[in-house]
Every structure is written in structure tokens, then in C-alpha cells.
């Protein structure tokens, strides 16, 4: 079962209460330090990768499904940036292929509007459950970080969906029945509507939108017959203009239980029957995101799975790397013909790639091919060094003797991507 965490402003403290002194990721990092593994190259890389993933988070739009590969020999982490509105519920699910029981740490961070603010951890999943389920208390960008334990990995998929956190409160209806919205002017603009008006025939059952406890049932001048309910996440629901109420103070209810029936009591006497539904937590907020049904079925990956984790090259001039896996997203760069790309993941008809200069984005899979053979051959006129990256300051990985003929697998700027005599690949300055 997924782990549901709804953390208020004291989020980090709440996490410590739930998991003890540390979250699962923090406990694992502490164990590495106590064992002295933070002094090893791999252990140090694992700790560094956790922070680097947040700095380089990949922006995605839910629903999102990605297939990727984690090399067990490398210490890596990946983070995804997703925008949430208050009241929306985000679910992140990790699946290894084939299934394996190693620990995977899934953590959720909130980014405030202040650009210099460090992302604040607001939720963590059990490292064996591999599912995180969280209701957003604040609107903004959230980072979902995925990191396996050391020396474990393989092929995996990550699925991110956004769902409503509340059940629709009028039986047989949905958001198309909303006739007046949060923030609409009232009394000639002197006040703003503090909820949603959901229109339905008189006598239609009004349902509890979440599990909780009835705090009050009363009648007043504005709301008529009303029910106040406090849900298990600490939010207070307000159901107004009921024809009748059928619950009592202190009664525990489950989502979908009948609280009363639609009417037009109170100041709604002159309007058609409807439910006024409001929600409060340190003041009112718009209930719509908590009720809105968004698409939850992501596009399946249609590219070549065998190329995930491998190198490919661009096969068509004019190819572009995009910010998102859609042609309508921002263009990050034009990709010259034969540019080598490291395939990090696949989603829909796209690969998520890293370019030779370290840029990260998405390229259409149909515009690439595997490095199965050279595009041509080149002869090294003088002695040269095979480099790790297309830069004169890069690390030398192998000497190439003068007169050596090398297969050229790709090009980038003034460099050739070649295979040396030992079989290693690297970069040579273009002659």
C-alpha cells in the first residue's frame, strides 16, 4: 500500500516523528557514514548525487511514465519536477524490471517561491514500498527524487499521476455541475465566494468528500442547514444550503457517506437547489483542485527499450532537443546531424537524453539510430589523445598513434566521436 503523508508547515518535524530520528534516505546515508563508506569514491558519489539530482531535476507534466536504467556500478539519483495545486494528490510509483526487492528511496521536496530557498523535504516513502502518495498543502513546484541503495539497479519505470484528494460531494454529479466558483464576487463585489456552488435537483444526496468526523450540524441565516466536517488530514469541510441533514455531531463518516440532501435553505432561498461546498485550513482555499479529475493514464513508451542506457546518434539535420516530450515545448538546442546522445530514459515516442556538452532534454526517438557502425573513417595524421569529452581540457583516456585509421561514430562541434584501437570510445579534435 502507498504511504500517505500530508505534512503541514512543520513538515520536516512531522517526518521525523513518523520515521524516528531520520527518514529512510537519511538513515541510509548515516549508515554509510558510520561504516566509513562516505570516504570511498562510490559512497561519496552516492551522497553527492542526492543533492545534484535536486539541482538538475527534470520538469515533467503528469500523468508521466518513464522507463530508465540505473547502472549498479554507478551512484546516481534522478529527480522530477511537477507542479501541484493545493489539494491535489500526487502519486509516484517505482517498478523494477524484473521485480527485485532492493531498497529505493523516494523523497518529495517543496520549492517555495523564493529562488534562493533550499528545497524542503515534505514526504518520504518506505524504501521497500516504492510508492509515495502525498496531498499538496501549498501550490507550487515539487521535486520527486528517486535513488536506489548502492550497487543495486537495472531497468525500472517511474509513473507519476495527479488525482483529486476528495470525493465529489454530490451523488451522481461531477465538476460540470459547478455553477459558481471560488472567488466569484458577492454583494456587488464587497466579498468573494468562499467555495463552490454545485447545482443538482432537490433531494440529491450530499456525500462526505473524505473520511472524517462531523464537527457540527446547525442552521444559520446564510448557509441554512449546514454540516461541518473535519477530515483525517486536518481540513474542515463546509456543506451548506442542505434541505435536511442526516448526521450528528461527533459521528465518524467515510468518504461517500450521506450527510444530507441538496436544498436551497438560508440565503439561497431564491436560487435553484445547490450545495455550497467550502474547505478550510488556516483560512478558506479553492476546493476545485481537490475535486478535479485529471487524466491518469500516461502515454506508454514506444521506443526501443534496448537503447535505454546506450548511445545513439542524430539521423536528421534539424533535430531538436526539447524541454518536454512534446513538439510544442521549448526548444533547448538544435542538434546537428550525427550528434551522439546518451539515452537516459524513454517516455512516449521520446528519449530523455544527455548531449555531449551535458545538456539534458528530450529528442524524438525516430530521429536517432544506434551506433551500430561508423559514419566514415578518419586517419590520425599525428599522435593524438582520445579524450573523455569534446573539449581540449578533457581527461585523456587513450593514446592514438599517428597514421591510425579510426571509425568515426559521430561528431559534435570541432570534435569527432571515435572508437580507439582498444575498443574504447572517446573524442578527437577534428583534423
Image (cartoon, helix red, strand yellow):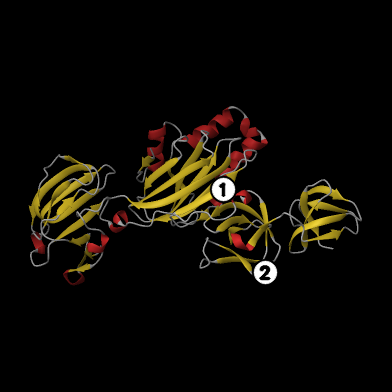
Q: Give SS at disc 2.
A: loop
- The part of the image, by quadrant, that contains residue 19 is top left
Q: Could you say where residue 281 lies in the image, as x and y percent from the top left?
A: 27, 50
78 sits left or right of 204 in the view: right
Looking at the image, can residue 327 be seen? yes
Looking at the image, can residue 395 be seen? no
In the picture as drawn, the residue positioned furthest to the top comes out as 35
- The part of the image, by quadrant, that contains residue 18 is top left
Per the image, the residue denoted by label 1 is 68
Q: Give SS at disc 1.
A: strand
Q: Residues within 10 Å of mark 2 (few under 14, many from 20)?
A: few
- Quadrant housing the N terminus: top left
In primary-sequence order, the first of circles 1 and 2 is 1
Q: Residue at x 52, y 49 (%)?
A: 79
Instruction: Please count the marks in the image.
Output: 2
Q: Residue at x 16, y 69 (%)?
A: 187
- Quadrant housing the C terminus: bottom right
In terms of depth relative to the viewer, which is nearer, 359 or 401? 401
**Gap in Å between the C-alphas at discs 1 and 2?**
26 Å
Q: Which mark is residue 126?
A: none
Q: Residue at x 31, y 49 (%)?
A: 165
Q: Could you say where residue 399 lies in the image, as x and y percent from the top left?
A: 85, 49
Q: Residue at x 62, y 58 (%)?
A: 359
Q: Could you say where residue 261 lies in the image, as x and y percent from the top left?
A: 12, 53
Q: Residues within 10 Å of mark 1 (few under 14, many from 20)?
A: many
377 sits left or right of 20 in the view: right
267 sits left or right of 212 in the view: left
Q: Could you say where residue 303 lies in the image, as x and y percent from the top left?
A: 57, 55
178 sits left or right of 114 in the view: left
Residue contact between numbered discs 1 and 2, judged by CB atoms under 8 Å: no
Per the image, the residue denoted by label 2 is 317
Amino acid at each position: 500500500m502507498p504511504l500517505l503523508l500530508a505534512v503541514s508547515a512543520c513538515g520536516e518535524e512531522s517526518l521525523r516523528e513518523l520515521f524516528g530520528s531520520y527518514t529512510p534516505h537519511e538513515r541510509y546515508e548515516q549508515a554509510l557514514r558510520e561504516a566509513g563508506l562516505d570516504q570511498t569514491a562510490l559512497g561519496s558519489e552516492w551522497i553527492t548525487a542526492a543533492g545534484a539530482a535536486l539541482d538538475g531535476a527534470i520538469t515533467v507534466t503528469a500523468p508521466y511514465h518513464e522507463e530508465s536504467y540505473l547502472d549498479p556500478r554507478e551512484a546516481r539519483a534522478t529527480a522530477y519536477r511537477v507542479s501541484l495545486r493545493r489539494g491535489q494528490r500526487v502519486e509516484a510509483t517505482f517498478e523494477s524490471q524484473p521485480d527485485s526487492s532492493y531498497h529505493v528511496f523516494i523523497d518529495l521536496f517543496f520549492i517555495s517561491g523564493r529562488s534562493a530557498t533550499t528545497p524542503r523535504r515534505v514526504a518520504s516513502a518506505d524504501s521497500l514500498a516504492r510508492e509515495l502518495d502525498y496531498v499538496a498543502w501549498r501550490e507550487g513546484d515539487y521535486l520527486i527524487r528517486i535513488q536506489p541503495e548502492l550497487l543495486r539497479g537495472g531497468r525500472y519505470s517511474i509513473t507519476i499521476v495527479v488525482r483529486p484528494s476528495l470525493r465529489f460531494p454530490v451523488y451522481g454529479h461531477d465538476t460540470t455541475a459547478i455553477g459558481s466558483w471560488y472567488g466569484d464576487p458577492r454583494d456587488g463585489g464587497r466579498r468573494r465566494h468562499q467555495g463552490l456552488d454545485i447545482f443538482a435537483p432537490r433531494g440529491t444526496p450530499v456525500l462526505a468528500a473524505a473520511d472524517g468526523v462531523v464537527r457540527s450540524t446547525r442552521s444559520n441565516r446564510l448557509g441554512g442547514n449546514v454540516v461541518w466536517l473535519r477530515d483525517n488530514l486536518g481540513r474542515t469541510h463546509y456543506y451548506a444550503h442542505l434541505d435536511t441533514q442526516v448526521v450528528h455531531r461527533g459521528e465518524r463518516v467515510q468518504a461517500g457517506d450521506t450527510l444530507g440532501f441538496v436544498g436551497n435553505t438560508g440565503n439561497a432561498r431564491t436560487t435553484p437547489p445547490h450545495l455550497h461546498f467550502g474547505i478550510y485550513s488556516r483560512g478558506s482555499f479553492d476546493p476545485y483542485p481537490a475535486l478535479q479529475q485529471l487524466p491518469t493514464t500516461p502515454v506508454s513508451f514506444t521506443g526501443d527499450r534496448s537503447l535505454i542506457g546506450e548511445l545513439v546518434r542524430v539521423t536528421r539535420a534539424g533535430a531538436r532537443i526539447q524541454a518536454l516530450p512534446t513538439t510544442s515545448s521549448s526548444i533547448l538546442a538544435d542538434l546537428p546531424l550525427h550528434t551522439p546522445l546518451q539515452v537516459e530514459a524513454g517516455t512516449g515516442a521520446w528519449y530523455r537524453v544527455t548531449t555531449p556538452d551535458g545538456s539534458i532534454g528530450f529528442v524524438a526517438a525516430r530521429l536517432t539510430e544506434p551506433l551500430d557502425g561508423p559514419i566514415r573513417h578518419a586517419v590520425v595524421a599525428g599522435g593524438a589523445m582520445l579524450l573523455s569529452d569534446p573539449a581540449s581540457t578533457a581527461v585523456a583516456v587513450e593514446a592514438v598513434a599517428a597514421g591510425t585509421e579510426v571509425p568515426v561514430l559521430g561528431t559534435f562541434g570541432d570534435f569527432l566521436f571515435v572508437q580507439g584501437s582498444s575498443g574504447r570510445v572517446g573524442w578527437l579534435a577534428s583534423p
